[in-house]
Amino acid sequence: MTAGTGVERGVWAAPGRVNLIGEHTDYCDGFVLPFALPQRTVVTAERLGRPEWSVTSTLTGETVTFDLSEPVTGWAAYVAAVVWALRDAGHDVPGARLHVDSDVPGGAGLSSSAALECAVLSALADLGGLDIPLAHRPKLAQRAENEYVGVPCGIMDQSASTLCREGHALFLDCRTMATEHVPLDLAGQGLAILVIDSRAPHQLADGEYAARRAACERAAALLGLPALRDAALADLSRLDDPLLVRRARHVVTENARVLETIALLREGRLREIGPLMTASHASMRDDFEITVPEVDEAVETALAAGAYGARMTGGGFGGCVLALVEAEKLDAVAEAVHTAFATRGFRPPATFTALPAPGAHRLS
Ligand code: GAF
């Protein structure tokens, strides 16, 4: 495949993300609405004259060297996975020395894995002078994670980390990969999004994610549809298994909520998306069953403290909650959540505000 003149060295960054709405819809060919976080993974890289990759990480202090002749495990697997996926797609990937640093919290449902994959992909593409359009990169990074790391994720996180724009949310049709960058001027409307990291330990998350995905695929197959994207609520009465009905109902109603959210955002009616966010959370809690007591508490407390809407974001079983609040109420809502967590005996949450940041790019 094409290889132009690459650069010798440089620094690249790719962000974590939150998802405003549209959870577990990506692998059902549905709709998602993430935006990139200012928190990002930074990769400093230089070309080596041989097909070998040497990666150090500030987070672990480790150096891992590989040439893909042996499987790579642990955090460096995400780096090896990208090299593997690029090569498998026919690209002449240059050997490289890479250093990874990140302020995307790991294990918090903020897409730290995709941030790493997409930063490494950007670095290797530029070092190798590889001609890979931005629009093709999410699928390469997803394939790296699906096939090499073995995580059956959808396309949302890699798309967000690659394609998001500052000040905008990314409306993505996961079937066609059509995108729309929707302005999200929170500050201009006196609003803020509070991110509450529940810090709930989420064991079982991998198996449960795969189980949800399998249930959705089974429901679609039983309905004779390509994916749940194609199902209407009325179709679900044709399913015998009440559990499958609930799983499918989440996806069908969630896709509709994304479309309603987009319609409101296009008209600048930000406050009105609150009830859709809260309904999304209820659907994840009751139909998809992917929430845990900590995230439910965060949602309920944020709403009681005056948030317009609140919902868990990401794969579930822990992770973060987003609350849409008046900027002037930020401190009060955060304070209320901290107090509620202490009262319930939960680990103290971490709270911060999220503004839409740019997708992957070269820093220098
Ligand atoms: C995780 C996955 F990686 C995404 O693809 C998506 O399915 C999300 O969970 C749930 O919406 O972040």
Image (tube, helix red, strand yellow):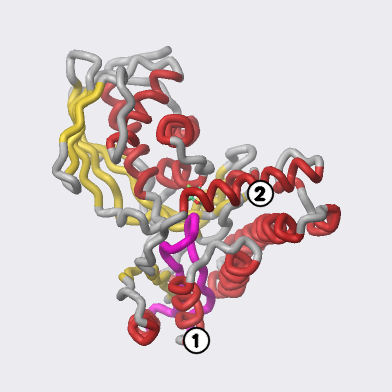
Give the magenta part as a residue range.
306-328
Residue 341 forms part of the magenta stretch = no
Instruction: Name the residue: 20% across, 27% down.
Output: 65
Residue 167: x percent and y percent?
41, 57
Q: Quadrant of the C terminus?
A: top left
Q: Amino acid at mark 1?
A: Ala
Secondary structure beneath dot 1 equals helix
In the rendered view, does 27 fall on the left or right side of 105? right
Q: What label does residue 304 carry, if any?
A: 1
Q: Quadrant of residue 325?
A: bottom left
Secondary structure beneath dot 2 equals helix
Instruction: Name the residue: 50% across, 43% down.
Output: 153
Q: Is residue 250 above or below residue 76?
A: below
In the rendered view, does 339 fall on the left or right side of 185? left
Label 2 environment density (alpha carbons within 10 Å; few <14, some 14–19, many ≥20): some
Q: Nearer the viewer, residue 270 or 85?
A: 85
